[in-house]
Image: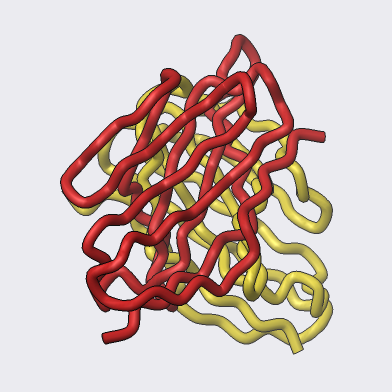
Chain colours: A red, B yellow
Amino acid sequence: QKEVEQNSGPLSVPEGAIASLNCTYSDRGSQSFFWYRQYSGKSPELIMSIYSNGDKEDGRFTAQLNKASQYVSLLIRDSQPSDSATYLCAVNHAGGTSYGKLTFGQGTILTVHP
Amino acid sequence: NAGVTQTPKFRILKIGQSMTLQCAQDMNHNYMYWYRQDPGMGLKLIYYSVGAGITDKGEVPNGYNVSRSTTEDFPLRLELAAPSQTSVYFCASVTSGGTDTQYFGPGTRLTVL
């Protein structure tokens, strides 16, 4: 069974600090990796996607992918109270029969305190 | 574009009742998905569809049925509701199944008592 595991939370960081969120996946055939942010009572919204090894930066967010270690992470620099949310790691086992299906981790709750 | 819409937003069912959760998208997306999210957990795939007339089971399909008669609509049917089906249900769609972004609807919060 394809599994996605995230570091257990909750994670609490002070405002202005770097928040580090981690995710491991079991299927070596996985090709697409996503980080979703979900505010309480809301639907997930995509904040980062990454498809190849290395780093991808978008504003204060950096996604890192290491396929050899089956590891993907999200760094949030200069964390703000508005970043407080649950962060979901999702993996697409892209291939001929995957049809874009995503497997989600259990989520990590991040709290940024002033 | 309205994106992905879901109705109703909230619903309380009694054990054994049935209902249909509605999902529609106006982005002409081929692929659509139904997920459920239990408290404190990630999303689990219930059913998905790759086009009108084509549906298949996901990870947790028991107790649910779907149909896809048009590109736009993908309703989820609950037959004989059980307390274990208390959850938040999200519908999502994407243009193709590769690297494209999945767009999520606002969700339906269902309680079975």
Residue B111 seen in render: yes
Expressed as whole percent of the image width and height from the top left, the position of residue B51 reads 50, 25
| Residue A99 sits in quarter | top right
Front residue of A90/B34: it is: A90
Q: Is residue B20 left or right of residue B105?
A: right
Indicate the position of residue A18 as horizontal and vertical percent values.
33, 60
State whether residue B36 appears in this view.
no
Q: Is residue B50 above or below residue B48?
A: above
| The C terminus of chain B: image quadrant | bottom right
A73 lies left or right of A18: right
Q: How many marks?
A: 0
Point out residue A9 in the picture as x, y percentages from the top left corner: 59, 69
Residue in front for this viewpoint, B2 or B75 = B2
Residue at screen point 75% across, 34% down: A2
Q: In this image, A99 relative to B84: left or right?
A: left
- The picture quadrant where one finds residue B6 is bottom left
A23 relative to A9, above or below: above
Q: Which residue appears at 34% of the width and 48% of the height?
A: A46
Residue B99's quadrant in the figure?
Answer: top left
Q: In the rendered view, would you say A114 is above or below B21?
A: below
